[in-house]
Amino acid sequence: MFILNEKLANDCIIIGSFPLSLLLLMNDSQYPWFILVPQQENLTEIYQLEMDDQHQLLKESCDLSKYLMENFNADKLNLGAIGNIVSQLHFHHIVRYKNDIAWPSPVWGFAKAKPYDSAQISHIKSGIIDSFEADLTPL
């Protein structure tokens, strides 16, 4: 049975569910930062997914990446499945701007998170849900 890691649950806002992955928004308004978490238990690495699920994760990641680049006017998109602090398999998608507070450094540990307000969350959620209505179940 899939259970979302407690740290991810505490640090993020659940947007919805793709066929394979839960879509999360990191609650830090300094960067549009989304995370895909495959909804399978006991995964720490992408290779542990069955091949069809690896392809599904790549599809979800590519679709999300394209959406983020087009809708957030990103200068760069940082992707990563690091897992040093949270071992549960999760795949970061971080929109970066040349004028963001951490550019060009990594965002991890750079500054204390600034949570989104409820209007910002609603705006982000509705944009994503509308764009992915065929593939994303809102939660």
Image (tube, rainbow, N blue to C red):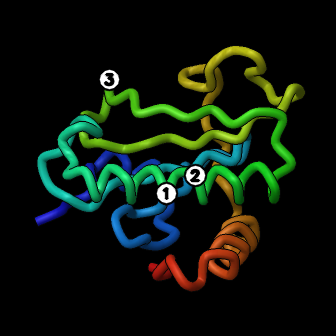
Measured Cα–Cα span from mark 1 to mark 2 = 5 Å
Query: As drawn, is 93 to the left or to the right of 105?
Result: left
Q: Nearer the viewer, residue 82 or 66?
A: 66
Choose the circle earlier in sequence order: 1 or 3.
1
Q: Is residue 83 above or below residue 32?
A: above
Q: Is residue 59 above or below residue 29?
A: below
Q: Tag 1, which secondary structure? A: helix
* Foreground disc of the pair 1, 3: 1
| Percent x, y of residue 64 | 60, 57
Query: Dot 3 surroundings within 10 Å: few (below 14), some, or many (20 or more)?
Result: few
Dot 1: few (<14), some (14–19), or many (≥20) neighbours within 10 Å?
A: few
- Mark found first going from the N terminus, 3 or 2: 2
In this view, 125 is above or below 39: below
Residue on which disc 3 sits: 84
Marks 3 & 2, CB-CB < 8 Å contact: no
**Badge nearest the viewer, 3 or 2:** 2
> Of the residues shown, which amino acid type is indicated by label 1?
Lys
What residue is rendered at 29% in x and 39% in y? 46
Q: Tell me how far mark 1 sits from mark 3, CA to CA.
A: 24 Å
Q: Residue at x 73, y 73 (%)?
A: 127
Q: Quadrant of residue 87?
A: top left
Q: How many marks?
A: 3
- What amino acid type should be assigned to the residue bearing mark 3? Asn
Which residue position holds label 1? 59
Label 1 close to label 2 by CB (< 8 Å):
yes
Label 3, label 2: how many angstroms apart (C-alpha)? 23 Å
Q: Quadrant of residue 88?
A: top left
What's under tag 2, amino acid-wise? Cys
Disc 2 target residue? 62
Q: Which residue is found at the position 47% from the left and 73% from the top?
A: 16
